[in-house]
Image (cartoon, rainbow, N blue to C red):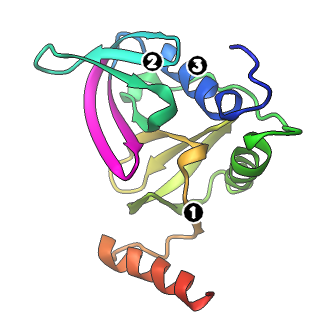
């Protein structure tokens, strides 16, 4: 991958592109988000190039996604282990203030149960962390998911939401935020 003067391309997009390249030919779930709109689609990845991932859905429709908008990817279990780029210390750009801190925090919590927003519906264990990437495993169904560090809104330590409905979990976080304002 190229160097983009330590922009979001270096620390989030390039690492996700490297993960996606390893998943060519596999059926994966892709969660994308932009301007408050979220989309989850299952495709078989056919091509990954120029920061675009392309594949076909179950109806044979070709779909193309900009990698910079990918929040998470859910590969099949046989796709693991994946090769992740090693964590690097950035010195400038968006990587210093956005990706580095949350990736470092996730790495320090490796092996622990957490709740990660925007995915509060499940307790996960942080399995592996690389540059711009956090791999987690659901405690409920044991499915692994690859998260882009740049889309992580918060990491709640411990399994405090175990057994709670998603609305209650979201309200808990909102109350915590409002209390601090």
Magenta part of the chain: 28-44
- The residue to which callout 3 is attached is 18
Magenta stretch containing residue 33, yes or no?
yes
Query: At 66% from the left edge and 51% from the top edge, which residue is drawn?
Result: 110
The quadrant in which the N terminus is found is top right
Q: Count the labels in the image.
A: 3
User: Which badge, 3 or 2, is on the more N-terminal residue?
Assistant: 3
Which quadrant holds residue 59? top left
Q: Is residue 141 visible?
A: yes
Find the distance from the CA under tag 1 to the CA under tag 2: 27 Å
The quadrant in which the C terminus is found is bottom right
Image height of 36 relative to 132, above or below: below
Left or right of 107 in this view: 115: left
- The residue to which callout 1 is attached is 154
User: Which badge, 3 or 1, is on the more N-terminal residue?
Assistant: 3
Q: Position of residue 14 (x, y in %)?
A: 62, 23
Task: Say which mark, if any, is on residue 23.
Answer: none
Q: Secondary structure at mark 1?
A: strand
Query: At 32% from the left edge and 48% from the top edge, which residue is drawn?
Result: 37
């Amino acid at each position: 991958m190229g160097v983009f003067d330590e922009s979001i391309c270096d620390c989030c997009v390039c690492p996700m592109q490297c993960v996606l390249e390893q998943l060519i030919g596999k059926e994966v779930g892709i969660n994308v988000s932009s301007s408050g709109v979220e989309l989850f689609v299952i495709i078989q990845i056919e091509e990954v190039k120029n920061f675009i991932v392309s594949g076909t859905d179950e109806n044979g429709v070709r779909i193309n996604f900009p990698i910079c908008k990918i929040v998470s990817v859910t590969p099949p279990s046989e796709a693991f282990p994946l090769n992740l780029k090693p964590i690097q210390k950035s010195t400038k750009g968006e990587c210093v203030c956005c990706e580095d801190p949350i990736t470092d925090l996730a790495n320090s919590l490796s092996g622990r149960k957490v709740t990660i927003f925007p995915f509060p519906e499940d307790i996960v264990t942080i399995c592996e962390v690389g540059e711009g990437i956090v791999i987690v495993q659901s405690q409920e169904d044991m499915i692994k998911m690859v998260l882009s560090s740049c889309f992580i809104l918060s990491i709640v330590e411990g399994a405090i939401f175990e057994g709670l409905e998603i609305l209650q979990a979201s309200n808990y976080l909102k109350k915590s935020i409002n209390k601090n304002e």
